[in-house]
Image (cartoon, grey):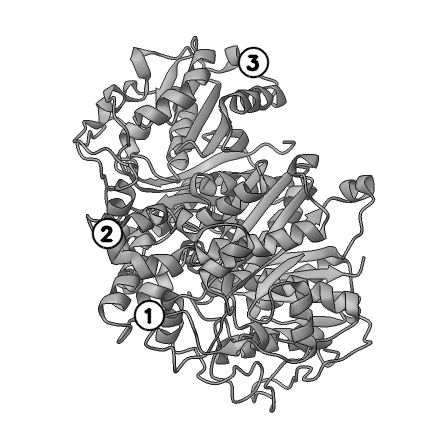
Amino acid sequence: MKQPIYINGLGVISPQKTFDVEGFLTEPIEYHENYILALDAAYKEYINPVQIRRMSRILKMTLSAAKKAMQDAGIEKPDAIIAGSGYGCIDDTEKFLLNMLDNKEMMLNPTAFMQSTHNSVAGMVALNVKCNAYNFTYVHRGFSFETSLLDAMMWMQEGKENVLIGGFDENSVNHHTVTNKIDFWKKEKVDAFDLLKTKTIGSISGEGANFMLLSSNKNEHTYGEVKDVKMCYKPNEEELLEALSKFLKKNNLEIKDIDIYLTGLNGDVTQDRIYYRSINELMKDTPVAWFKHLCGDYYTAGSFGLWVAAQICKRQEAPAILMLDGASPKKPIKNILLYNHYRNINHSFYLIQS
Amino acid sequence: MGVVSSIGMNVEENLQSLKTSKTGLCFTQFLDSIHKHELPVCEIPLDDDALAERLGLSVSDGYTRTSLLGLLAVKEALASAGISDMKSATTALISSTTVGGMRNTEVIYHELLSPNLREEYINFLNSHDLGESTERIADYFGVKDFVTTISTACSSSANAIILGARLIKHGIVDRAICGGTDTLSKFTINGFNSLMILDKEHSRPFDDSRVGLNLGEGAGYIILESEALVKKENKKILAELTGYSNTNDAFHQTASSPEGNGAFMAMSEALEMSGLSNSDISYINVHGTATPNNDVSEGRAMHRLFGDALPKFSSTKPFTGHTLAACGGIEAVYAILAIQHSLIFPSLNFKNKMNEVDIAPQTTLLENYEVNHVLSNSFGFGGNNTSIIISKA
């Protein structure tokens, strides 16, 4: 990419203290369930009281996170708004669906239907900051956020200066019940920080609203630079290794140049064993970090991973809670390779540089 | 290009229906809704098993109606582009949908939640989300290089076309299969009904008496290929994508601004990109849903942009119904047909101009009309406005 792409603003609402706090994971919270929720923020500080009453929780989370990311970057109106979500506004979707089924299609209130569409988040943010520019919503499972990032990066090559991107997904009890039947989640109680010690299938179901303001301008707001992102659809082990090798080569890097290897390990013994094994072997001399014990797993968890990488770049420190096997990265921390996948289907590599 | 809709299971059948003013509007045979005798819809007259049979598939393997319609349209598109080997060029599949597997989910929702799930539903446990149908299509045809899904309400598949063009422009892929698929569901029928924008009669775009839309289902895809690939393979070109724009109205969550600001910007920017002047546009395939709000907003935007020199325009939604995420793809196919066959399709059911804006659509089939550049509009909830321009190659 000719035009460098900087992360200049962050707004992240997650199960950790990531919003309106100064520190970087200084007081990590350990969860003990297979279903974890984001910590509610002081939404009233970001949304006017008339509007807030009609909004669902995910709309409050995403609007607050989006506004925070713009404030953090000192930008009032971006040149494009691009959001990604695997399940969209699943709670409102289920609400309207259940009302419809239980009330035999009578006396239905349209509010939940209106808010159930996947693009209601990006549309709402545009409405809120009166942004008439490019507005997109990607809804492809574990590529939802990654396609948003790639799209933003293409636009910035074409001259757009400030692009707001976000990944969001919310937990819902019914959806959890359904996906539990196909072993998405652990059946037993699990201590999140010991997730990798489990030898069972499934992960812990998380959620979050993770927004970032990407800019072509490097300034005092800059956290780090996104060098590249690559998605791989259903690769076998060989294809995955080849994709990684090409990815590094394209960016003129070798494995030894990677200062932190940030993984999306999620504690599902079948998934972690197959896919991370070969890359982990390749990266055996690189300090390894992970993040899903903090945010849980969900389709757009990669956006939480990118937040982690951006914070590490700016602060030049990786809190111990992120590091595996007590590793500690040498400084300066320059290159972070993030590798994530969702259910062995949607694999992605990100390269972030300080 | 490939298309399935209530007026035909392939491009040729759609063309014949468009030429003979044959609408797909009917009462549903397959949806068990309390509205089934009251709200007409444009339904494809085949059940899921019959659709699956055409593809050599079995519904019980977890194929939703949305996936089946998408598969049928992509299959025709690939055949029409002469593509049999996905490895011959870097290929993207960019699909779109608004409700994904909802048609199937809503029928078995309580079953899915129950502890004693019947075996026949096991394959539908992971079929609800919007990416699922895209992956079914990718796997059926062997697309691996780039796979994604867009959902921007009724502008979704027009946006899929934009992304495809941009991926090619940036050298990320050589070709892109772009479009969308959506099925009728009780969820959408009741959703739109709760907003009171469904018509119990034939919808009447741009007519003063219009009260709302008719819902439809279908899928439409076009295949974009880079200039280099087309030259290398010496391929027949159906048309050229010469302009596009995506804007946001930023006016209301579900309604369009009365002046059509987002629509005006989308059309103007698409024109600017194409380098064409207003008078080069031969035909506008309007979004034209026949809701009181859309048609005034879109009509005013067209009037502002083109003044009294408004090109011929029509809405093909009275034929197909409003197919939501699929309409941009289906109407892109219709734009290509208009160019290929020198036709302007009629806007059915129009009688009197709207009070608010002094414009009238083409109401009869125009034959032997040279169509060089088609402006196609797709607007949606969330303020999403998209215009694309398809030109004679």
Q: Name the disc covering residue B264, or none.
A: none
Q: Quadrant of residue B101?
A: bottom left
Residue A238 x, y percent position in the rendering: 53, 21
Q: Is residue B182 left or right of residue A316?
A: right
Q: Is residue B128 above or below residue A309?
A: below
Task: Name the residue carrying label 3.
Answer: A254
Task: Name the residue carrying label 1.
Answer: A110
Q: Earlier in the sequence, mark 3 or mark 1?
A: 1
Q: Is residue B312 left or right of residue B151?
A: right
Residue A65 x, y percent position in the rendering: 36, 46
Element type where label 2 sits in the image = helix
Q: CA distance from mark 3 to mark 2?
A: 49 Å
Residue B97 x, y percent position in the rendering: 48, 56
Chain ID at mark 2 = B
Q: CA distance from mark 3 to mark 1?
A: 54 Å
**Marks 1 and 2: CB-CB under 8 Å?**
no
Chain ID at mark 3 = A
Amino acid, disc 2: Leu
Task: Name the residue carrying label 2.
Answer: B113
